[in-house]
């Protein structure tokens, strides 16, 4: 049955590349997934262990997963069957191919749990299969095996956790659908899929005939979390009644409603009316004092007659003369508010109070 | 298909250009050309012509459109009262004229400080003044009085807003009026030198002419004769002519008049 995925040699290559890509994305350190180069390298020291501690629980989760998982023993056989097949190189790295790769590695990882330096035979066969797809066969194979052994000998917790890391990731990625490959293979892959109605994704119809026998093992959003990624707060506390975060759709809907309710101006006059209401257009006939309502409530005598503020000053003498001049000047000032004028006078009062000693000395300060 | 080709001849132009808008070449059915002509060529056509778009146009203000505007605005207007059909009536009923300016400019701001200035014009004839108060008012007003038109112009610009300045100007007018009616104590100390115009009644001229007449006619110097003389027409005339000469500018007529009056008084 072609429903189950057929691992082609090219797909293996893709797996390889995909795994590399995955490594770059998740910055995990494994023997197989290497940074920068396509060929496997020995340095996984550079790949630190940022994920070590948070993944501790992940390891347990993984174990549970694996326990519940149905290990595909068939993969090895598939690998061997693919040795003869050489298909055209397809550049596209699809998620499905990733998935099938991960199944392989998952299996490998599950084997990795027991701390043996001996690498399992299945692993070896897998390695050989992969190596066959690569140009430098022997070297690749040897390096792969080396890495595997290193893993199994392990640096104790670190190694284990490293494997746990990558295995978590793999497990997370893999949804156990090798069947998808067949679906994509059914359609020539160089046809571009359009999403016609602009949803941004392609709604693919399920070919029920293909999947009648297959039961989904994992539902996407159920099952235990592997805590690879930090869960956003909203998901963690769904019962908390916080202010609803408006999605873009909500905003768009609100805009649509507003547009319907508002009447688009039919002509220039209506546009002018709308703008006047919004405040974009001045009110005609032009009032140069529009907007100064607060100032308008102040009567004129508060601006002009400021002598009553001179009560605290001496009645005679140079200070009085001076303050009268000040008051006169202020009364003619049309730029200041009453408050500012009183503040001016207050300032003078404070100033003269400060200099009281000097003034007394000069016999100026008469009360 | 551009709009111009769909336009009927008897369309309403005011619906094509209801408000001020830049030139739309496919909405204005006129074959206009604008621009400096290239060598051996004509000015550029209107299609896509920036020169036509840049300039302000009045396509929205055709006479018909203006008429429509006026008829629409009429609903918001009140008619001019029929009673006020002459200037004099207007002046009589509304003696105080208030002037202020509004400023419109294209710019980001609506404000103009010159808009706050308010000027009041009052004719002194419309104010209830007697001789003394009138003189006093003119003295108090000073520069604000215009003797040519006999008006007082009070300008107020001390306050930031027009409303406040108007109130202040009205206040000033009221104060002027009431102050001019008051008689201060020290006003009684006015001497002859302080007078701003010539009064004949207790002047040297009066004493001189009366003495002359008395001596001329050989009359007795008694109050009754003086009174008689005072009431005589000639002397009144003499008095008027002298006052005119002294108070107003010398003119030929006034001098001739004086000559006549002197002749009459002295019986020449």
Image (cartoon, helix red, strand yellow):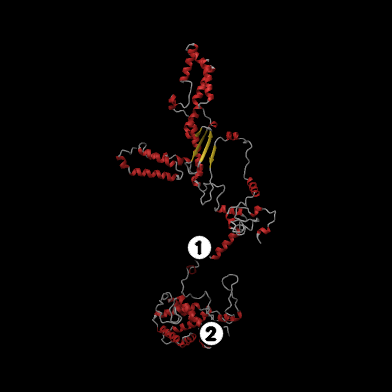
Badge 1 local density, few (<14 within 10 Å), some, or many (20+)?
few
For label 2, the residue is: A8
Q: Are marks 1 and 2 on the same chain?
A: yes
Q: Residue B100, image x and y in percent? A: 53, 41
Q: Are marks 1 and 2 in contact (CB under 8 Å)?
A: no
| 3D distance between C-alphas at marks 1 and 2 | 51 Å
Q: In x, y percent, where is residue B160?
A: 48, 44
Q: Nearer the viewer, residue A280 or B32?
A: B32
Looking at this rendering, what residue extends furthest in the front direction?
Answer: B40
Picture disc at residue A243: 1
Residue at image point 47% right, 32% down? B140
Camera sees residue A344: yes
Indicate the secondary structure of the residue bearing disc 1. loop
In terms of secondary structure, where does tag 2 sit?
Answer: loop
Q: Chain of mark 1?
A: A
A269 displayed left or right of A138: right
Check the image and report above or below for B190 versus A32: above
Most foreground residue, A71 or B214: B214
**Mark 2 belongs to chain:** A
**Relative depth, front residue between B3 and A160:** B3
Quarter the N terminus of chain B occupies:
bottom right
Choose mark 1 or mark 2, whichever is in front: 2
x, y (%) of residue A127?
47, 86
Observer-nearest of A91 and A43: A91
């Amino acid at each position: 049955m072609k429903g189950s995925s057929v691992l082609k040699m090219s797909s293996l290559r893709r797996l390889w590349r995909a795994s590399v890509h995955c490594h770059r994305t998740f910055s995990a350190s494994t023997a197989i997934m290497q940074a920068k180069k396509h060929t496997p390298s020995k340095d996984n020291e550079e790949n630190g262990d940022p994920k070590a501690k948070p993944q501790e629980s992940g390891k347990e989760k993984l174990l549970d997963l694996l326990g519940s998982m149905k290990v595909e023993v068939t993969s090895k056989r598939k690998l061997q069957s693919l040795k003869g097949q050489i298909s055209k190189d397809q550049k596209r790295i699809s998620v499905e191919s990733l998935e099938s790769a991960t199944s392989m590695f998952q299996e490998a990882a599950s084997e990795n749990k027991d701390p043996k330096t001996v690498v399992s035979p299945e692993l070896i066969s897998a390695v050989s299969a992969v190596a066959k797809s690569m140009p430098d066969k022997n070297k690749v194979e040897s390096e792969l095996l080396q890495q595997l052994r290193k893993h199994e000998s392990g640096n104790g917790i670190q190694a284990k956790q490293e494997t746990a890391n990558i295995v978590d990731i793999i497990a997370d990625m893999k949804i156990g659908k090798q069947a998808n490959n067949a679906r994509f293979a059914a359609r020539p892959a160089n046809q571009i899929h359009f999403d016609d109605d602009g949803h941004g994704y392609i709604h693919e119809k399920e070919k029920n005939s293909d999947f009648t026998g297959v039961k989904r093992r994992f539902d996407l959003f159920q099952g235990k979390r592997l805590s690879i990624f930090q869960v956003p707060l909203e998901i963690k506390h769904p019962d908390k009644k916080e202010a609803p975060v408006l999605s873009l759709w909500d905003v768009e809907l609100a805009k649509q409603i507003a547009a319907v309710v508002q009447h688009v101006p039919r002509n220039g006059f209506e546009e002018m009316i709308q703008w006047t209401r919004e405040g974009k257009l001045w009110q005609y006939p032009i009032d140069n004092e529009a907007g100064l309502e607060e100032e308008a409530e102040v009567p004129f005598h508060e601006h002009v007659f400021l002598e009553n503020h001179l009560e605290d000053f001496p009645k005679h003498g140079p200070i009085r003369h001076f303050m009268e001049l000040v008051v006169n000047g202020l009364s003619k000032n049309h730029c200041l508010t009453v408050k500012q004028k009183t503040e001016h006078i207050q300032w003078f009062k404070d100033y003269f109070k400060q200099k009281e000693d000097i003034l007394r000395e000069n016999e100026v300060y008469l009360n | 298909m551009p709009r111009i080709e769909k336009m009927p001849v008897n369309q309403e132009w005011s619906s094509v250009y209801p408000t001020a808008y830049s030139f739309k070449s496919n909405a204005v059915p006129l074959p206009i050309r604008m621009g400096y002509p290239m060598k051996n060529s004509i000015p550029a056509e209107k299609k896509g012509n920036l020169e036509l778009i840049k300039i302000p146009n009045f396509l929205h203000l055709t006479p018909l459109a203006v008429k429509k505007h006026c008829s629409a605005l009429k609903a918001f207007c009140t008619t001019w009262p029929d009673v006020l059909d002459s200037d004099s009536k207007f002046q009589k009923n509304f003696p105080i004229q208030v002037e202020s300016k509004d400023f419109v400019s294209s710019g980001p701001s609506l404000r103009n400080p010159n808009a706050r200035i308010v000027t009041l014009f009052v004719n002194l004839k419309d104010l209830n003044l007697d001789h003394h108060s009138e003189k006093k008012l003119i003295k108090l007003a000073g520069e604000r009085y215009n003797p040519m038109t006999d008006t007082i112009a009070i300008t107020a610009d001390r306050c930031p807003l027009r409303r406040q300045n108007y109130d202040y100007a009205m206040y000033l007018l009221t104060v002027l009026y009431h102050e001019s009616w008051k008689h201060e104590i020290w006003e009684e100390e006015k001497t002859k030198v302080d007078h701003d115009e010539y009064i004949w009644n207790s002047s040297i001229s009066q004493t001189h002419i009366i003495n002359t007449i008395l001596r001329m006619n050989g009359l007795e110097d008694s109050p009754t004769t003086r009174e008689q003389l005072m009431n005589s027409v000639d002397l009144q005339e003499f008095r008027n002519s002298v006052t005119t000469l002294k108070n107003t500018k010398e003119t030929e007529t006034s001098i001739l008049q004086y000559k006549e009056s002197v002749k009459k008084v002295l019986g020449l």
